Amino acid sequence: MSGWLAGIFLAWRLWAWLLPRLDVSAAGLYLQDLVGRLSHGGSLGTWDLPASPGLFPDAGLVWFCQSQQVDPLAAQRLYGLLLGLLGWACLAWLLRCLWPLTKPQSRVYAATGLLLVLSLSGAGLDTWLFPAQHGAAWLSALGLWAWTLRQKEKPDGWLGTLIWAALAAGLAASDPWFALWALPPLLLLALRCRPDQWPRLAVAVGLGLGLSYLLRTSLKQHSVSLAQPPWDSLATRPWPSLAQAWAWWSGRLAPLWPLLAASGAGLALWAWPQKDRHSGPRVLLLGWLILALGGAILALRLDLPGLGWAYPCMLPGLFLPLLVSERWPAWNQVALLVPLLASLLCITPGPGLSGAAAQRQEEAGWLRSVLAQDAHYGWAAPGPARALRLVSQGGLVLAPVLTGKDGVQPQAWCGDRSLWSEGAVLQRPQFVLADGLDESVIRRRLGAPDRVLEHGGSALWIYQGPQSGSANERTRL
């Protein structure tokens, strides 16, 4: 009973944690856009996808959430709740495989570990529970490590192994970070198994990698534009000095210092030998060090803009409540109560949406109130274009455009090219949200607007007359 009560408390605090962090950026909402377009007869072949498209299992969860919630922000929040509870189950399984715990104990320690990380996480890691933000890949890696640990005591047959290999292939094809996170610990943990189990595990690894390669290749064969990381820069870019590398890492990780401090304490206790431990925690520690250091070096060499590569830094923090209880059993109650109190103090439910999400909702309502009833399509910078289109639930069709020396160019990154390739939305927009666009370029292309409205720092240019397009043109969109 205590394990389920801990899960209910986690779900409550997670629901509050998600509300002020709902992401309305083009990257944060792209998977909802993708699933919505496909469910209305669109084709995956017309999409420009990122290098980690997050199609499995993210797209399935997004489809379920959209079937339950029409509002995209509410669907995103439901997705985060489901993924957080999935992470709770995977972490509890991993803890049971690493330490001699009962199911209720593992669930309690997993819930407190997640609450501690949620309470301390800062900017950069606060979107890990949103679609296509690598969270599903990271949590799935925890589950795969737990499965590999189980093979020493309760090995699966060939059927179960092949099923896990197929699941891993879908995850690696959807998000290559999954393979980078899962493989080093998996290979080391597999060496703990009996030698007669090695051929089965080797076949599983080979099958998973081969299938993931074929799946990504098939996307390209179906005309899907899949972005690729700048791998060429690994060979051509000179290695930075140690001081430059430290400045780069410290600058990126600066907002995470509370979480890094907790993870550092967890890492110290994890590395501190304990006579009652079996070899699993020590081997996983070595694998974690390899993937954490490798991910940091890869991020430095590719100059990655986000912090998805830093997800492994959370793992020692997730273990911290259990590690404190293991080292000092008399402190068990304190180790459990501190994360619970921290979650109550740091995760405060607000009256509603805050930040960019509330701004986009308010902006979408303002646009619908000031535009004519038959005005549906216009231009906007890539940032607000998708958010306003989805938040308005299809009431507005905004093409993401860039303005520069080449004029007005549609920007279809993480978007459906068929929506912008032809039609009045690109040739004769009915309005332009001028924020982030070069006004002189817009004037050269469309002329002076008929009306200009301002609201909260946003400038709306309204075009009427022949530039508004015909009803037939609007129907095609």
Image: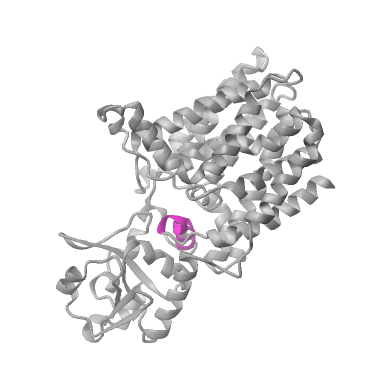
Question: Front-most of 337 and 238?
Answer: 337
Residue 18, compared with residue 443, is above or below; it is above
Can residue 107 be seen in the rendering of this structure? no
Q: Residue at x 34, y 41 (%)?
A: 228
Locate residue 455: give its quadrant: bottom left
Instruction: Give the x, y percent position of residue 191.
Output: 61, 17
Q: Residue at x 52, y 36 (%)?
A: 169
Instruction: Give the x, y percent position of residue 215.
Output: 45, 39
Locate residue 334: give its quadrant: top right
Q: Residue at x 37, y 84 (%)?
A: 371
Identify the residue at the far right of this view: 1
Query: What is the chief secondary structure element of the magenta stretch?
Result: helix
Instruction: Give the x, y percent position of residue 384.
Output: 38, 65
Please indicate whether residue 461 sits to the left or right of residue 246 in the image.
left
Q: Which residues are magenta?
A: 26-37
Please indicate whether residue 104 sits to the left or right of residue 23 in the image.
right
Answer whether residue 29 is magenta in the image.
yes
Which of the image's four quarters has the C terminus? Answer: bottom left
Please indicate whether residue 332 sits to the left or right of residue 339 in the image.
right
Question: Front-most of 460 and 423?
Answer: 460
Residue 363, compared with residue 310, is above or below; it is below
